[in-house]
């Protein structure tokens, strides 16, 4: 029986699992994201303990928060790049895990890994050109075009694009330490807390926060469609669990683009949907990476 390891390495918490297939998790653990040494140490210890228990894996897929050097040609492949997460800039995630576990490592951003999982098993099935957007502690987008991830100067960082300000949100400065009022700075979970003074989960469905939130996310979706020609934009992450938010974003994105190219999805048009795999998209994306690693 071939076993695979998966790590959903988020900026807030890490989840590790041993799989023998998509629907069979033999062991799993979760722990907060603290310092690189402590966090990676927990992950290494988990896989070492599983190996001692007879559940050794040879390949581990990592769906990791970023920015991240994901192109194998990059001289710092597998490293975290300059990030807002304290202590993590420059961390060699892939190298430390490979040395600590003795496993082959397959690595992608958390959002690109989730896009692979959604294309294989979730809301992106049957499509080669999709975007997966997560809205939580940060906002990130993974792009698959022709079924392949997009790499260039780095991986896409669509959450840091700008959007016109909502007319009821002209004075909020935004929370992004790099760009202030980029979309992540205006629509991430920390932005909601900074603007309204409470957790997003405490805001009622009819609160004006959600029209403002949908405004910025719709501009993100429309820009992705217009610049990359994806056929489906899939939204996941904790903030998107809000009742009706995906529908609001879809309607506003369609209005932004208007009649331009609005054929049915798969016939030249696009749609905006919620994640089919829910909050497991990242962990299942890590499994997909491990199963499909080129070794």
Image (cartoon, rainbow, N blue to C red):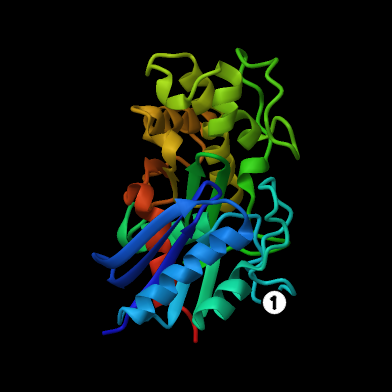
Q: Which residue is mark 1?
A: 73
In the figure, residue 167 lies in which quadrant?
A: top right
**Residue nearest the viewer, comparing 45 with 82:** 45
> Which quadrant is the N terminus positioned in?
bottom left
178 to 197, vertically: above or below? below
Residue 232 left/right relative to 77? left
* Residue nearest the observer in this picture, 20 or 219: 20
Q: Answer with the quarter of the image where residue 70 lies.
A: bottom right
Count of numbered marks:
1
| Relative horizontal placement of residue 127, taking residue 161 as reference (left or right) | left
Q: Position of residue 79 (x, y in %)?
A: 67, 66
Q: Nearer the viewer, residue 155 or 264?
A: 155
Q: Residue at x 54, y 66 (%)?
A: 41
Tell me: residue 118, above or below residue 174.
below
> Is any atom of residue 254 visible in this view?
yes
- Where's residue 114, x and y in %? 44, 57
Q: Residue at x 69, y 48 (%)?
A: 86
Q: Secondary structure at mark 1?
A: loop
Task: In the rendered view, tell whether residue 161 sits above or below residue 295.
Answer: above
Q: Position of residue 183 (x, y in %)?
A: 63, 34
- Pinpoint residue 83: horizontal percent, then vertical percent: 70, 50
Q: Residue at x 42, y 44 (%)?
A: 236
Mark 1 Cα within 10 Å, few/some/many (few <14, many 20+)?
few
Identified at 64% across, 50% down, the residue is: 157
Q: Is residue 145 visible?
A: no
């Amino acid at each position: 029986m071939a076993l695979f390891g998966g790590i959903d390495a988020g900026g807030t918490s890490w989840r590790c699992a041993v799989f023998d297939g998509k629907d069979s998790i033999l062991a799993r653990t979760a722990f907060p994201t603290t310092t690189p040494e402590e966090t990676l140490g927990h992950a290494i210890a988990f896989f070492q303990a599983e190996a001692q228990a007879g559940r050794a894996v040879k390949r581990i897929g990592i769906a990791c928060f970023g920015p991240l050097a994901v192109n194998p040609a990059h001289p710092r492949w597998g490293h975290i790049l300059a990030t807002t997460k304290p202590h993590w800039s420059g961390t060699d995630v892939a190298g430390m895990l490979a040395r600590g576990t003795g496993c082959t490592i397959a690595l992608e951003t958390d959002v690109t890994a989730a896009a692979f999982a959604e294309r294989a098993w979730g809301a992106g099935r049957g499509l080669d050109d999709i975007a997966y957007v997560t809205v939580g502690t940060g906002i990130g987008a993974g792009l698959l075009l022709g079924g392949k991830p997009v790499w260039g100067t780095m991986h896409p960082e669509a959450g840091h694009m700008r959007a016109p300000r909502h007319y009821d949100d002209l004075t909020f400065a935004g929370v992004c330490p790099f760009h202030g009022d980029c979309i992540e700075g205006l629509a991430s979970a920390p932005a909601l807390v900074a603007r309204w003074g409470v957790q997003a989960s405490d805001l009622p469905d009819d609160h004006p926060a959600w029209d403002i939130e949908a405004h910025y996310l719709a501009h993100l979706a429309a820009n992705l469609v217009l610049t990359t020609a994806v056929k489906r934009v899939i939204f996941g992450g904790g903030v998107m669990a809000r009742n009706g938010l995906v529908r609001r974003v879809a309607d506003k994105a369609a209005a932004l683009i208007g009649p331009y190219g609005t054929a049915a999805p798969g016939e030249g048009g696009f749609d905006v949907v919620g994640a089919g795999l829910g909050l497991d998209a990242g962990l299942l994306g890590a499994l997909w990476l491990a199963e499909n690693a080129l070794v």
